[in-house]
Image: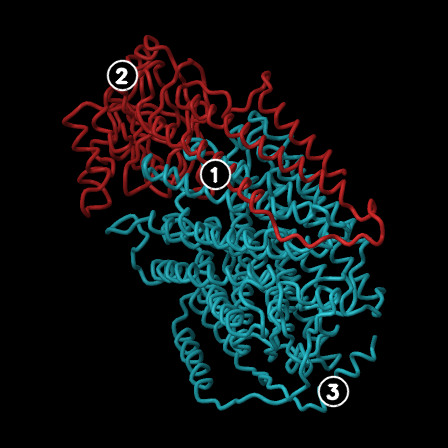
Chain colours: A red, B cyan
Amino acid sequence: MKMKWALLTILFTIATVLTGCDNPLMVLDPKGPVAATQANVIMISIWTMAFVVLVVVVLYVLMILKYRASKQSDDYEPPHIEGSKVLEIIWVAIPILIVAFLSVVTVKTTNEVEATPKGYEKQEPLVIYASSSNWKWHFSYPEEDIETVNYLFLPTDRPIEFKLYSFGPIASFWIPQLGGQKYAMSDMVTTLHLAADVPGEYMGRNSNFSGSGFAQQTFNVNVLPTKEYDKWVDEIKATAKPITEDKFNELLEPGHVGQSTFTGTHLKFSPAPEGENSGHHHGTSDTEKTDSEESSKDSHEGHSEHSNH
Amino acid sequence: MDYFDRFAVPHPSPAIYASMIAIGLTMIAVVAGITYFKKWGYLWREWLTTVDHKRIGIMYILSALLMLFRGGADALMMRAQTAVPDNGLLDGQHYNEIFTTHGVVMILFMAMPFIIGLMNIVTPLQVGARDVAFPRLNAVSFWLFFMGAMLFNISFVVGGSPDAGWTSYFPLAGNEFAESVGSNYYAIAIQIAGIGTLLTGINFIVTILKMRAPGMSLMKMPMFTWSILITNFIIVFAFPVLTVALALMTMDRLFGTQFFAMANGGSDMLWANLFWVWGHPEVYIVILPAFGIYSEIISTFARRNLYGYNSMVISMVAISTLSFVVWAHHFYTMGHGAMVNGIFSITTMAIAVPTGVKIFNWLFTLWKGKIVFTVPMLYSLAFIPIFTLGGVTGVMLAMASADYQYHNTMFLVAHFHYVLIPGTVFAVLAGFTYWWPKMFGFMLSEKIGKWSFWFITISFNVTFFPMFITGLDGQARRMYTYSESTGYGPLNMLSFVGAIGLAIGFALILYNIYWSTRYASRNISNDPWDARSLEWATHTPIPEYNFAVVPTVDSTEAFWDSKKKGFKLFSGKIEKIHMPNNSGVPFILSCIFFVWGFAMVFSMWIIAIIATIGIFACMTLRSFEKDHGRYISVEEIEETENKLRGAK
């Protein structure tokens, strides 16, 4: 009995907390198309699963209330029941339908979030190399020819392609309000597609445990309207010092550093592990394909291996 | 002195020194106590050399309880550290060590041995056998597990605990980033225990396939036995992967190979794949026996046969098969593209179907039943709705696109605790209480048991439910601290409060054991729960040969039929019984394994080589030893039987 009320309270709390509006949970408060897709999937799955839980709990409460020994006469002998083909087919078939529905949702949206976001296909994506070292993030903007440490400026309304890799343990690049995470690893480059709709300041972090300084491996994300973003880039170019190999190696030393800004990128003297620099030289690896196709064709074609359309 | 520096803990703290002293004093007290009471001979004859499945099972369970409190202490420290923002109770390094050991200890040295302990005690009885197929191998299994667990546990006072997470991902666990011997302990201690588990797998498959009582066809086996058979098949298929992965890890760390290194063609992703090819089936190794335990208990206390026996068996086979084709869902975010992730999402969600079948079958076992709310039944009933929450959040996590947001967060932590605690922990507590009278000849107190049940069940939800919410709010797992501005403080404090409640609940279990040992009535029947399967058909305490006459079976519930329909379970007369002899070799072999492991951890090659020779010497000795066992005479059996009958 107590159980039932506890459960109902819990369910009710989930529903209120998740749909509550004054202080929405980060993942359910998207500021870009990828995170929005994911928040939708999460809500679809929560409601579908709430239905499943409801069915189970209702049956459960009925059974416990009705068939407790204290409600039956002492000489009641429960019958021997083998099972029921019809009932068993029902509780195989309905879950299969639910799983099929969720599978369609999953496959469709996984393809979506692994490609340039819808509505942004026509634009040239902004490519940013995001590399992790213990316990920092280095952001290289090849197009602008600048580099930042532990903070990120992004323009709104332009697709962004993060090229992720690591100078150490596996890290996971995550900006919850812009979209889900992806691993940064030392022997290959992975691609994460994001875009931001709403200007603002967001939290970004490494979410994959990477040693003693992991908890503080965070970075700030500033999303600006395109004009202000361009102004920021010009300012950096006018004021920041160029990054040198020595300076970069100093930054790679394990530890925490504050935010800093440079002109140029470390990619020139310390290229990302893709193409010929990849850790794997066997056969046609994913990264090599990305590299060669990217240099020859437009971005949509170049990432066809991530999506099936 | 330089030589001894390696044994120092790299990041000492007062807590560690205090533990060292406590461990030292306890050891001295134990040795002194045994000597004072002149119990060395008893210990050696009755326990250290035993090959009896019941005693081995009890030793498994005692070790598991010990490890439960070790892992629980880690958990309590973790929750205390994260209870308030910017807490300075533990430093990052210490926190990393305890969440690593918490994971390893709870999965490998608590859940597994608890399950294997119950399996040891119950399975041979349920199939009407006198012991397992290979009793001496069974002793080897136990002692290897025990020595592996001990080796792992001394890490925190000698040389340093592993600190790379229980998943031990490379390159973090490689020499470059994990310089202390902690990860050596991980590789070698788990390896030793893992070999023991693999042997258990073979042993129980043979026991169940070859030693069932006459008439017990596969489809007449009790559901617990079915779950054990399937589990052991998973063990035999999954554990070799772990053996190989850990061997490669050992070579990487000790001999400079680069299987999982970043350079020279090694791959960190290879470790992740190998680990989870074992790791996911491992989850089902600890959950399927739990399903078996619940099936027994729910049917016993609903006073009804299990609903949908056939579909219960089929669904377990389906789950075990699917468990091998879902491993990549542990790292959707590794960048293997939408196609691969889509396939693994579908296979993962498919597991919900057979699991759902089981949930509904349990619910319909209650239908038209006559439910008695004993402590084992309370755990089993609490399991159904809580596990359903764990299951449905599992389906949510299975959806790759959304998983990019859940991965590495507290949402995931909440999910797997919602599956493993009501799944495995409640099951072993239920099974422990349920089979306790068969093991020890008296019942545990129902009253204290109910108190601990409510403490554990409510506190469990208070501890872990908030994590779903903080996870969706972006709290990553394994963070030793967070700033106040994140707003995670209040819910983490709530988790800590829950954790204290859990600690009280588990402490009450200990108190229950103490109280019942002192005060509980010894005058109980062989079948105190009015149960349905064969383990209740023999005497309490169980004679070493289990059954004086091997039972004959013609249905899934032959013992129930013998009580209700007058079915004759024991026909035939008493004959002399062939039993295996005790042997000290398994214990000695495992001690040498311990020395070998310790030497390997610290790269002390000469000792390692001598120990390796010792290991092979023990195996050679066994190969040439002529031990045909012994016979218990008819007179002796009759005498025992009369005494046991008279005791009632």
Q: Tell me, yes or no, whether dots 3 and 2 are on the same chain.
A: no
Q: Give amino acid for label 2.
A: Lys
Disc 3: host chain: B
Rendering coords of residue B499 (x, y %):
67, 43
The residue lying toward the viewer, choosing from B2 and B194, is B194
Does residue B499 appear left or right of residue B159 in this picture?
Answer: right
Above or below, comparing residue B6 to residue A256 in the picture: below
Residue A263, numbered circle: none
Mark 3 lies on a secondary structure that is helix
Q: Give amino acid for label 1.
A: Ile
**Residue displayed at 32% across by 27% down:** A139
Residue density around tag 2, few if under 14, some if 14–19, many if 20 or more, within 10 Å: some
The residue that mark 3 highlights is B638
**Residue displayed at 55% across by 32% down:** A49
Rendering coords of residue B395 (x, y %):
50, 38
The residue that mark 2 highlights is A237
Alpha-carbon span between mark 3 and mark 2: 97 Å
The residue lying toward the viewer, choosing from B393 and B573, is B573
Residue density around tag 1, few if under 14, some if 14–19, many if 20 or more, within 10 Å: some
| Label 2 or label 1, whichever comes before in sequence order | 1
Mark 1 lies on a secondary structure that is helix
In this view of the protein, can residue A256 be seen by the observer? yes
Image quadrant in which the C terminus of chain A is located: top left
Mark 2 lies on a secondary structure that is helix
The residue that mark 1 highlights is A96
Does residue A129 appear left or right of residue A3 in this picture?
Answer: left
